[in-house]
Each structure stands twice: as C-alpha cells, then as structure tokens.
C-alpha cells in the first residue's frame, strides 16, 4: 500500500513539474494535454435540447454538446465571440449578428442564421411548452407567441397563438440576422451565451422527442449512443467541430439520484469530478481532498425580502434596523460550516462592476439598529414578526438564527412560517401574500449587473417579490440598458445599486460558495465563473 | 377452477379502481394544497403567466379542479351545458385518466415530458435483476441456515443462526444499506481496489458502492443481498421450525428404518416436505421486496422502479405515481392469484369451486 501510494505521489509530482515546465515555456500547451476519459457526477437532466434544459444537470451536458454565439471567459467572465463573427448595434435595440461560416451540426446541417432563428422561435412558442421560453422575453413580438389567458382564470384550452415566429427576428442573409428587442438593452450580447440561445438543427425541431434522446449538437462533443435515462450519458469528441477541441477524448456523465450515492462513488474512485458535495460531508471532504477541492464564492444569492406591500415594512428605517441586527458570518459559521460568503451588496462579487459594502446596513450594529427603530416609531407592541421560508429545504435553521438575533437586538418576538411546499410558497410570492420577511434566492441569467437588479427590484418586474418600486431606480436601470456599451452601462447600474443599499427592499444575506472535488486523474480542473465546471476544458493526466 | 379464476379476476376490477381513485385523490390533494408543481420548476424566476399556463396544461395539471381544495376531480361542468345525461356535468379528470390508461394505454407524462410507460419499461429490468438476486440469496442462505439449525436444535450453530437472524431483522434496511455502502463498498472496496491481483470484476464491479453501468450485473449483487437480508431471518426460521417438525415425522423414521443414507433422508424426505411453507413465503415476499427496493435502489443508485417512485413522489409527479403504483398493484394481485392457484396444484386436498 505504502509503496503504491509513494509511486502515485512521485508520478503526480513529476506530472506537475512537467506541466509547470510546459507552462513557463511560453506559447506551448500549458492548458493540459488532450486525451482520456473524464467521468463526472451528474443528476438526471430534464432535457437535452437547448430550448428545454434550464436546470444544472441539463446545462452541464448541453454546454458540451452545443455551442452558441458567444462564450464566457473562465476567469474574468467577460463575453467572447464563439460562433459569432460580430454582435453589433447602434441603438442597443436592433442587434445585427454575423455568424462565422463553416460550422455544422453533427448531422451535416450548416449552423447558419436559420439555425438560431429556428431555435429561438421554437423555445418562445407557448404550446411547445419549452422551459427556456422564459429567456426570449426581451425579443420583440414574444407576446404573440405566448398569448395571455383572455378571461384570466384558467380556460379549458390555452388560446392558440396567431403566429409561430418572433416578429423581432429577421434573416438578412445566410449568415446574418437581426434581433429587435422590445426595449434597448446594452447587455444583450451577454445573454446569448446562455444555452437557451444555442442553435438547433432542422432535423431536431422536426422530431424533438428523438433529438432529446439523441441530441444533434454543434459543439466539441457529440453523443455516443443515446441518453440512457437515469444511468449515464456518454459523449465523444466530435469531428465536425471546427473550434478549439475539447481536452478529454470522452466525457461520461454518471447519473445519480442523490448526491450521497455520488459521493460514495467518488470515494471509490469511480468519478473524476463532482461539481457539488453533500453538505454533511463537506468538512470530511475538505480534510481528505483538501488540495483537490475547488472553492469559489459564487453568484448564487440568498436574500430575505421585505413585503413592502405590507404597512409594517413601508418605513425604510425598520428595514435597515432589521438588517443591522443580523450577524451574517456567525450564522454562516454555525449553520453552514462556513460555506457561504456574507453579502454586502446586491451584485455577485465575481461580476464586473461589483463593489463591496454597497449596503451600509449589512454588518451587525445593534446600537444603530435600536436608534433607527426608535426613529421609525418602534415596532408595533406585541406583534410577532413572521419569518417565511419554504418547507423541506433546510431553511428553518438559519432563519431561526436570524429571528433569534433580531429578538436579541431589538426585542421583537418572531415566529417561523416554514410549512409551505416550494410550489405553494412561490405562488404565495407571486400573489404577494407574505406577511413578513421571506427567504428567496436568485441566480444570474447572464454575467451582467442588470441580471441582479431589474428582475428583482424593477417596478413590476417578474421576480420583484417585495413589490418594490422606485422611479429613480427604474430610470437609472433604463439609462444603463440604453448605454452605448456594456462598460458604459456599469456606472448607471451602480448608482441604482447604491439606492438599493440605502432603501433595502431586501436584506442581502450571502453568496453560496461553490465547491467541487476532483480525482487524482485530473491534471487541470477548469471552473468557468459563469457556466461552472467546464468538462471540455478540464484535462486528465496522461499515462506515458 | 375456471369459474373461480373468473370470479377472482372480476374482483380485480373494484380493487384496481379503488386503488386508482385513492392515488388520484391523494395526488390531486397534494396539488391542491401544496401548489402547482410546474411553478416550482421555474424556482426563483417568475415565468410569464402565459408560458406557465401553457406548460401546466401540457403536463396535465391544467384542470381547474386542481385549484379547488378538497375537490375529488370526479366531475366537471360541461362546456356546452348539456353534459352527461343532461345533468350539466361531464366526467372529470379521474375519468380522463382511466380512459387514457385503459383504452389508450396512455399513462401520461412526467414533469420532463417523458412517457410514464417508457420510464417504467426502462426501469423494470434493473428491478427484476435486483429482485432475482435478492430472492436467490434469501432462499439459498436462508434455507441452508435453517436446515443446519433445524437438524441440531439447541446446538451452538442453532444459537448462532438465531442471534444473527435477530440482528438482521432488527436493523432497518436503510441503516443496513447505508452501512454496507459506506463500509463494504467504499472502505473495504478501496482496500480491494488497491490490490493488483484481484480481478476488476470483483474489486471494481461487485464491490462498487453504487450501481455501475459497466458491470450491470456484478454491481447489483451487494444491493440485492441487502434487499434479500430483510426476509432472510424469516426464511431461516421458517425452515428451521419446519425441519424440526418433519424430522420427527413417521415417514422420516420409516426412511431411516429402511436404511436409507442420511443424505437421502434429509435431502429428499425431510427437506422437500419442509420447503412448502418456505416457498409460499418466498412467493408472497416478492411484494414486500418491492417495498424494500424503494429504499435499496435509492441508496445504491439503482435506476429501477423503486427509485423512480421515490423521485416522482418527491417532486409530486401525479401521473408517474398513479401509473407505477397501479402497475405494481396489478403485479401483486396477479402474483397472489397465482400463489392461490398453485396451492391447488401442489395440494390435492384444496379445491376451488
């Protein structure tokens, strides 16, 4: 045993030295060598079509099978052109997209303007019931494909849309098309790197069920066999891909029903990468795989929202006082083994334009909290503060800690309302029926500040569950949307975030730390700040 | 006999309909009280109402009765006002489901738009393999232990079987499963995998902590043994009692008196007769093993029926739960009927009129 371990250690060191040597050699291949089979943990995906898959396990597979107009830089999360030659606009409203020629799907069909228009239309068309129809919301004419219920209370049949095509998409020539948006949006180029905007082949749209089982991709990998539901998905390097090839020859996704079983398989050496960990095994894993564990304060946001539609929370000083009585770090240490990073702003720290301490009320200061509460006229005597969270997802514990801290600091008694299942909880949120602060989360749709601002705090925006409305914020967000470039938009968004930091429509709690582990077989593990673990770019140690 | 079988088959109808109504009502109540599961698919992103509605309808949660708490979804107001026999109502969601299942063999789709029939046909082979391993393990080990203990009642071996079966019977299967996965699959398995002389089939296949597609049979052996161990104790003890009883029977004494070899006395005369109650038990036990499979398959990540039921119950997929459980009910009913008929075949004293 010992002898064997030593041998492995020596080989590992030698490989590491070799890799370093290559790296210092300048332009030579320092991103690891190609070859080998990468075995990764995955849950059962919902769909393997770009228009359908919007959950983590689906996206991990789709991102290797398909490629889109743009991609994200792994370290800086900046937008880089992938299949697009250019993405340009004069007014941020009508965008002209030119596609590089020569790219094809696995079945030989060309990746041209039609491939994108087809895919986006398919996703947006209501009766196709595609989860990523949501992401087409900015494109002009989307309402015609998702007609509203005329009588508002669930008719027997959804009204038939008048058209199957988005009015905002126009083909110019084979490799050029224009996208007209409902309103100017400077961040549009960042949105189209999301798999919902990836192209689809004609053969795929014609038989979507078959294409879901055996996807016809256009990316660096293609299917080896078809999707073995609940068992495995195997990908091999695709010959038709013209871009930078993937590192492993083969990627095998093993499908697990629960993460504990996956962890057992990893411990037994059956997996090379796990993109997530069972929370209860975190400490053990860190100890055992310390240097092979990857951690990063991610962009998954947890907040406690205020129902501003409720009179108790209309005064911003009340909101500030409640936020000031919470010590985030102590909750993170006690409940989460330190696996979160306290939030002091509203935009993920990894994003361009994110700043620290935007929120002046997000660190514990009991004196100031008491003073603000007194200024606001105090909390109604004898009234209990109701804290909401959905049931069965492990939120009770930390929310109780929040309640205890508020009680200790301000003397406000609280009660937990944690018995609603997720679906009903979300419906309560949609109907604005919360009676007290509520737990919710948010993950970005694209790496652009706006994704953390408008959907949550814009007047009447979809996920604005607080019912927050501020004309100044709306104006600043609009100003950012219409700015002439993504860079130019940042100051406007930052100003809007400053207002939020003062008004606190929600209490920012923390950013989840992403944690992944990889095996001894992995040479270089690549984590993309936007799209998470990048299996195609992860290289394996080559046996010589 | 023929009339008996027909009568039993007719009894299936109310049983199956009753089960289906219960399942239908429970899953409908779940939607009515805990909200539209389609909304949960979108999570924190509030979908446009039109899109939500389109997907809700596509997935079969669009019936307005699912918004009314407590509504059994039996009847709905007829669109044209006439309805069934002029009552103004027409058959509702429950009858739609019955119609789909029995006339079109359409069990509906899950939240991922996959046909329930496909899900089941993908899962069945794994569960069957697991069940076969479990039953074989249970029968071979259980009967062997029972025979050894039964022939030497009160001996050290007898007590050992007694104590070990009490131990196995008192550990819940999910505890046993987790312990085996952790210590046999991971810890002990890692030691084996570190030895070069052990073939891959054993170290990587059999001792894999979870089901492995590369070794579809070998990696099911340990999960199957865990599943079988639940009824192992009952099998062993049933054999033991039965053997003890039969050893003292007249025909065994006769066989011994005739001077037959001990092997033949035990093997043919005693054991064969002692096995009748054991075989009956094993037949009935298939139903219980299906229940155990729900736990074992989840722990060992076996993509069978049990894991399918667990997953769909967690996400509230009505159609999958109704479809799979209805199929299971049919299987258990048929198995019971078969066992009853076999009684008559095995024992000429039993007659069905």
Image (spheres, coloured by chain):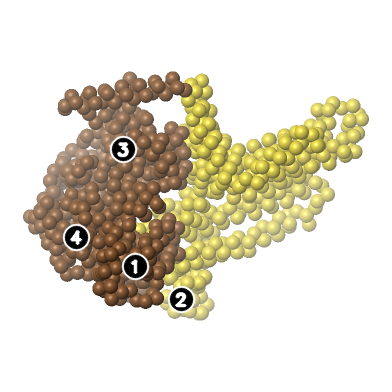
Please, which chain is the residue tagged with disc 1 on? A
Distance (Cα) linking label 1 and label 4: 27 Å
Q: Residues within 10 Å of mark 2 (few under 14, many from 20)?
A: some
Horizontal and vertical percent position of residue B78: 45, 75
The residue most toward the left is A90
Horizontal and vertical percent position of residue A471: 17, 70
* Label 2 element class: strand
Distance (Cα) linking label 3 and label 4: 35 Å
Q: Which tint is chain B?
A: yellow
Q: Which tint is chain A?
A: brown
Distance (Cα) linking label 1 and label 2: 54 Å
- In front of the other: label 1 or label 2? 1
Distance (Cα) linking label 1 and label 3: 49 Å
| Mark 1 or mark 3: whose residue is earlier in sequence | 1
The residue most toward the front is A367
- In front of the other: label 2 or label 4? 4
Q: Which mark is residue A535?
A: 3
Please, which chain is the residue tagged with disc 3 on? A
- Residue at image point 36% right, 71% down: A435
- In front of the other: label 1 or label 4? 1
Distance (Cα) linking label 2 and label 4: 51 Å
Write down the residue under mark 4.
A497
* Label 3 element class: helix
- Residue at image point 40% right, 37% down: A287
**Looking at this view, is A24 or B71 the one in front?**
A24
Write down the residue under mark 1.
A410
> Does the image show residue A208?
no
Q: Which mark is residue A383?
A: none
């Amino acid at each position: 045993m010992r002898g064997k371990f030593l041998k492995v250690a020596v080989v590992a060191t030698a490989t590491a030295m070799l890799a370093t040597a290559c790296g210092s050699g300048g332009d030579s291949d320092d991103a690891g060598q190609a070859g080998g089979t990468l075995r990764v943990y995955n849950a059962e995906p919902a769909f393997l079509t770009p228009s359908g898959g919007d959950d983590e396990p689906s996206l991990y597979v789709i991102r290797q099978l398909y490629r889109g107009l743009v991609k994200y830089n792994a370290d800086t999360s900046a937008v880089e052109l992938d299949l697009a030659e250019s993405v340009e606009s004069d007014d941020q409203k009508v965008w002209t997209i030119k596609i590089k020629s020569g790219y094809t799907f696995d079945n030989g069909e060309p990746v041209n303007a039609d491939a994108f228009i087809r895919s986006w239309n398919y996703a947006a068309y209501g009766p196709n019931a595609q989860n990523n129809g949501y992401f087409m919301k900015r494109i002009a004419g989307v309402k015609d494909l998702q007609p509203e219920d005329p009588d508002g209370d669930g008719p027997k049949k959804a009204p038939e849309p008048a058209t199957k095509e988005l009015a905002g998409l126009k083909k110019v020539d084979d490799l050029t098309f224009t996208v007209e948006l409902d309103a100017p949006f400077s961040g549009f180029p960042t949105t189209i790197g999301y798999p919902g905007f990836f192209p689809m082949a004609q053969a795929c749209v014609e038989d979507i069920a078959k294409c879901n089982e055996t996807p016809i991709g256009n990316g660096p990998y293609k299917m080896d066999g078809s999707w073995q539901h609940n068992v495995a998905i195997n990908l091999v390097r695709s010959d038709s891909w013209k871009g930078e090839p993937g590192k492993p020859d083969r990627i095998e996704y093993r499908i697990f029903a629960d993460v504990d079983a996956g962890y057992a398989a990893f411990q037994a050496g059956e997996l090379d990468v796990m993109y997530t960990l069972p929370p209860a095994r975190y400490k053990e894993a860190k100890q055992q795989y310390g240097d092979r564990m990857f951690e990063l304060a991610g962009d998954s946001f947890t907040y406690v929202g205020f129902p501003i539609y409720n009179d108790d929370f209309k005064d911003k000083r009340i909101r500030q006082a409640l936020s000031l009585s919470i010590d985030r770090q102590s909750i993170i240490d006690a409940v989460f083994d330190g696996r979160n990073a306290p939030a002091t702003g509203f935009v993920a720290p990894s994003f361009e334009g994110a700043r620290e301490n935007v929120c002046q009320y997000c660190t514990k200061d009991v004196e100031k909290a008491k003073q603000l509460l007194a200024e606001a006229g105090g909390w109604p005597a004898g009234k209990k503060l109701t804290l909401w969270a959905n049931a069965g997802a492990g939120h009770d514990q930390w929310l109780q800690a929040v309640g205890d801290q508020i009680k200790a600091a301000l003397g406000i008694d609280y009660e937990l309302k944690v018995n609603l299942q997720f679906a009903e909880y979300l419906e309560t949120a949609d109907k604005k029926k919360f009676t007290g602060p509520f737990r919710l989360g948010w993950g970005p749709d694209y790496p652009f500040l706006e994704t953390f601002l408008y959907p949550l705090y814009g007047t009447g925006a979809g996920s604005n569950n607080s019912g927050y409305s501020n004309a100044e914020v709306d104006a600043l967000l609009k100003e950012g949307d219409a700015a002439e470039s993504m860079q130019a938009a940042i100051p406007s968004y930052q100003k809007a975030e400053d207002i939020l930091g003062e008004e606190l429509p929600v209490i920012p709690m923390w950013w989840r730390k992403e944690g992944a582990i990889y095996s001894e077989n992995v040479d270089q593990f690549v984590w993309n700040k936007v799209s998470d673990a990048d299996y195609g770019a992860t290289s394996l140690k080559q046996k010589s | 006999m023929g009339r008996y079988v027909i009568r039993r088959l007719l009894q299936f109808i109310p049983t199956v309909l009753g089960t289906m109504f219960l399942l239908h009502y429970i899953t409908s109540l779940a939607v009515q009280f805990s909200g539209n599961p389609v909304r949960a698919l979108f999570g924190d992103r509030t979908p446009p109402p039109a899109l939500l509605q389109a997907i809700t309808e596509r997935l079969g949660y669009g019936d307005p009765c699912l918004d009314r708490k407590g509504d059994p979804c039996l009847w709905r107001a007829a669109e044209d006002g006439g309805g069934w026999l002029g009552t103004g109502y027409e058959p509702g969601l429950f009858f739609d489901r019955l119609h789909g299942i029995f006339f079109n063999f359409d069990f509906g789709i899950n939240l991922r738009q996959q046909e329930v029939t496909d899900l089941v046909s993908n899962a069945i082979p794994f569960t069957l393999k697991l069940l076969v391993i479990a039953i074989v393990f249970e029968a071979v080990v259980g009967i062997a232990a029972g025979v050894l203990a039964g022939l030497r009642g009160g001996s050290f071996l007898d007590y050992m079987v007694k104590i070990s079966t009490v131990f196995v019977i008192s550990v819940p299967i999910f505890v046993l499963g987790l312990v085996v996965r952790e210590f046999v699959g991971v810890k002990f398995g890692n030691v084996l995998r570190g030895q070069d002389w052990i073939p891959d089939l054993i170290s990587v296949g059999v001792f894999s902590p979870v089901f492995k597609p590369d070794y579809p049979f070998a990696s099911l052996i340990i999960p199957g043994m865990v599943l079988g161990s639940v009824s192992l104790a009952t099998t062993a003890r049933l054999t033991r009692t039965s053997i003890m009883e039969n050893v003292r029977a007249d025909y065994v004494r006769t066989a011994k008196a005739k001077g037959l070899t001990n092997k033949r006395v035990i093997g043919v005369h005693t054991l064969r007769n002692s096995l009748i109650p054991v075989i009956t038990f094993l037949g009935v036990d298939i139903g219980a093993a299906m229940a155990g499979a729900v736990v074992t398959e989840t722990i060992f990540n076996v993509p069978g029926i049990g894991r399918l039921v667990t997953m769909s119950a967690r996400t509230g997929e009505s159609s999958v739960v109704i479809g799979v459980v209805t199929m299971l009910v049919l299987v258990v009913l048929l198995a019971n009927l078969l066992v009853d008929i076999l009684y008559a075949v095995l024992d000429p004293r039993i007659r069905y009129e």
